Image: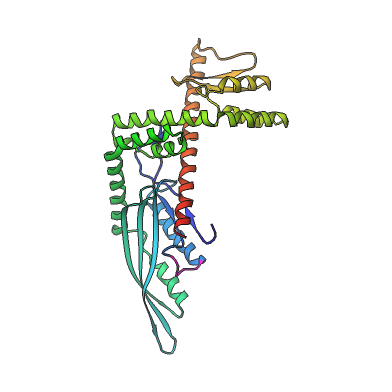
């Protein structure tokens, strides 16, 4: 991806269950398209400006919604004198696009005039004038977030249906990415359906990758890397079709794997014993294990979703190179 700069950021993630809660995600991407007048150093300056802007508004991650800039010089004048000056009139625009559908959800254009002893110096000056705060920027980001939220609220049922089709086609990672982005504030009944569908997609993904993980674990065992094998086996949950084989392998090398049931129960299966929740101490341990298991699963789901977002970002950048 030579000469392509990208920041992958998300508007404040707060996770409960498997998907995000009340926030909207935006990724910031710079491509060559619309930035042809700039060299790499100048693009890096814009990258830092946009990073400042999104950081000031609580951004920190990945999404199918991308924020990308365009820099256009629409007038260039040479003023001759004791020292010649290049005067540039520039439009610097920001767009928010959902890159699956291509729909634009927001835009902001700033008109900038800058001058310098050379075109490069004038461009440098113009970049320093790009506004990343204030009422106009705040209104742009606020309206964009509102429009995206309205999209989720209006299309929650459709998203559930699209995810269902992806699951039928065994495109589990795409389904996970689609569902993971839905905020909790879309409404309890629809959000519950989304969570159920996300669990279904994740289970399908787990089963689809199960055999590969078993092979990885066996190869690690052959190479006397039992610790690596246990880490792979730990990712195999009870609902997976190869869980029993994973458990047996774990026992054979003297380790244990977490057993996470569909009801959320979790216990450690180890060679020669197990957990019995008959005392208050055992119950506390079980509760802690459940919390750890939930966090671990949420982390795995997020990793799958982020991987899909970034894959789609790469395609977007190649298409706009």
301, 286: nearer the viewer? 301
- Compared across the picture, whether 194 is left or right of 203 comes to left
Residue at x-position 49% and y-position 42%: 307
* Residue 72 on image: x %, y %: 38, 69
For the question of whether residue 106 can be seen, the reply is yes
* Residue 152 on image: x %, y %: 31, 40
Q: Which residues are magenta?
A: 35-39
Here the colouring is rainbow
* Residue 113 on image: x %, y %: 35, 73
Q: Quadrant of residue 220?
A: top right
For the question of whether residue 295 can be seen, the reply is no
Magenta stretch encompasses residue 165: no
**In the rendered image of this protein, does residue 68 appear above or below residue 121?**
above
**In the rendered image of this protein, does residue 122 appear above or below residue 231?**
below
33, 26: nearer the viewer? 33
Q: Quadrant of residue 80?
A: bottom left
* Residue 57 on image: x %, y %: 37, 50
Q: Quadrant of residue 19?
A: top left
**In the rendered image of this protein, does residue 7 appear above or below residue 174?**
below
Residue at x-position 48% and y-position 67%: 42
């Amino acid at each position: 991806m030579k000469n392509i700069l990208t920041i992958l950021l998300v508007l404040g993630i707060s996770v409960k269950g498997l998907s995000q809660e009340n926030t909207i995600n935006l990724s910031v991407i710079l491509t060559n398209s619309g930035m042809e007048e700039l060299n790499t150093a100048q693009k890096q300056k814009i990258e830092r400006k946009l990073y400042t802007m999104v950081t000031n508004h609580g951004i920190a991650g990945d999404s199918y919604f991308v924020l990308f800039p365009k820099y256009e010089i629409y007038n260039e004048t040479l003023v001759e004198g004791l020292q010649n000056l290049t005067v540039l009139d520039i439009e610097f625009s920001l767009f928010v696009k959902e890159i699956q559908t291509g729909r634009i959800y927001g835009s902001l254009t700033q008109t900038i005039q800058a001058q310098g002893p050379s075109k490069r110096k004038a461009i440098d000056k113009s970049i320093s004038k790009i506004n990343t705060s204030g009422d106009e920027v705040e209104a742009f980001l606020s309206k964009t977030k509102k429009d995206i939220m309205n999209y989720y609220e209006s299309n929650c049922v459709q998203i559930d249906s699209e995810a269902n089709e992806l699951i039928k086609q065994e495109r589990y990672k795409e389904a996970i990415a689609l569902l993971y982005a839905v905020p909790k504030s879309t409404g309890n009944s629809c959000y519950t359906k989304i969570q159920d569908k996300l669990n279904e997609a994740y289970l399908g993904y787990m089963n689809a990758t199960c055999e590969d993980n078993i092979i990885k674990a066996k190869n690690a065992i052959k190479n006397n890397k039992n610790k690596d094998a246990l880490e792979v086996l730990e990712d195999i949950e009870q609902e997976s079709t190869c869980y029993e084989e994973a458990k047996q392998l774990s026992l054979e090398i003297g380790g244990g794997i977490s057993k996470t049931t569909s009801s959320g129960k979790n216990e450690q299966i180890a060679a020669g014993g197990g957990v019995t929740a008959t005392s208050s101490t055992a119950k506390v341990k079980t509760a802690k294990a459940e919390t750890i298991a939930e966090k671990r699963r949420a982390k795995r789901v997020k990793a799958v979703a982020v991987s899909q977002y970034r894959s789609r970002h790469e395609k977007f950048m190649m298409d706009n190179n």
